Image (tube, helix red, strand yellow):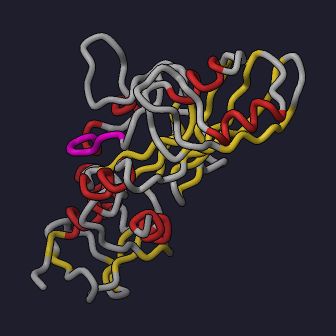
């Protein structure tokens, strides 16, 4: 295999922009096959050379994958003429080519995957794959077993066909109820429309997982991190 520049290798692995990884190299943080390397133009061969940053081995990735804990107030888009987008949370050097996989409403928080891997994004969003997405919702009203049955049967939310069966878990029930909802499709404003249909409008909404990928509790809203090799591998099995 042909060698690639070390700074490119590190950037593709999600350690930062080219400028940021050059700073890591300058500080002597990077080793190749046990030897400290400071030259960004040094060539490495993915799969043959062992690259480490500090004590962590850095695997090569052709694509980039980031897990974001999306805050409210941003739209899930690469650009928007009127609203701030989730890409504005990333430094300029990391934005090129990445996009959100699916959309979360402006006021919805939680897990959002961003990548430049179009093939994986297509698989995760394909209606044929029925990839599970789990949401936590605070709703106005007392959710009950009748609502659970309605979700399980599928609801008419005004589209051409009813929703696919969904799982509704009752976490806390009262004048306001905390519930978890598992969907296997991704219609426009689906969770909000389903809850509205049973007379319990959504107050707050948070996505907890998408397929095998789960929200990282250590990430505060607005923070992100690269996916681990294990997370990427499991997502590709979806």
Q: Note whether 49 is above or below 238 in the view shown.
A: below
Left or right placement of residue 150 versus residue 30 in this view: right
Residue nearer the viewer, 1 or 26: 1
Left or right placement of residue 177 versus residue 218 in this view: right
Q: Where, quadrant-wise, is the N terminus in this rendering? A: bottom left
| Residue 49, percent from left and from top | 28, 86
Looking at the image, the residue that sits furthest to the left is 2
Looking at the image, the residue that sits furthest to the top is 82
**Residue 97 is one of the magenta-drawn residues:** yes
| Residue 214, percent from left and from top | 58, 53
Residue at 29%, 67% in the rendered image: 61
Residue at 73%, 25% in the rendered image: 138
Magenta residues span: 95-100
Q: Note whether 215 is above or below 58 in the view shown.
A: above
Looking at the image, the residue that sits furthest to the right is 174
Left or right placement of residue 238 versus residue 118 in this view: right
Picture mark count: 0
Residue at 52%, 47% in the rendered image: 184
Residue nearer the viewer, 17 or 234: 234
| Residue 16, percent from left and from top | 33, 52
Q: Where, quadrant-wise, is the C terminus in this rendering? A: bottom left
Residue nearer the viewer, 45 or 170: 170
Left or right placement of residue 39 versus residue 82 in this view: left
Residue at 27%, 55% in the rendered image: 117
| Residue 219, percent from left and from top | 59, 44
Q: Quadrant of residue 229?
A: bottom left
Q: Note whether 83 is above or below 79 in the view shown.
A: above
């Amino acid at each position: 295999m042909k060698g690639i520049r070390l700074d490119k290798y590190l950037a593709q692995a999600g350690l930062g922009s080219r400028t940021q990884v050059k700073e890591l190299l300058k500080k002597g943080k990077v080793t190749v096959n046990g030897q400290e390397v400071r030259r960004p133009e040094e060539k490495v061969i993915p799969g043959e050379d062992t690259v480490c940053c500090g004590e962590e081995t850095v695997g090569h990735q052709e694509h980039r994958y980031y897990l974001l804990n999306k805050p409210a107030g941003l739209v899930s888009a690469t650009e928007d003429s009127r609203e701030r987008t989730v890409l504005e949370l990333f430094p300029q050097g990391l934005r090129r080519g990445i996009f959100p996989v699916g959309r979360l409403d402006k006021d919805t928080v939680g897990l959002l995957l961003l990548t430049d891997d179009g093939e994986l994004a297509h698989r995760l969003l394909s209606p044929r794959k029925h990839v599970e997405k789990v949401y936590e919702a605070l709703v106005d009203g007392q959710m009950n077993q009748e609502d659970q049955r309605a979700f399980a049967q599928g609801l008419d939310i005004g589209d051409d066909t009813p929703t696919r069966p969904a799982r509704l878990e009752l976490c806390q029930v009262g004048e306001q109820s905390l519930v978890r909802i598992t969907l296997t499709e991704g219609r426009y404003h689906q969770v909000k429309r389903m809850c509205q249909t049973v007379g319990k409008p959504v107050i707050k909404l948070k996505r907890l997982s998408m397929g095998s990928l789960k929200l990282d509790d250590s990430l505060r809203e607005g923070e992100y991190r690269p996916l681990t090799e294990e997370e990427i591998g499991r997502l590709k099995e979806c």
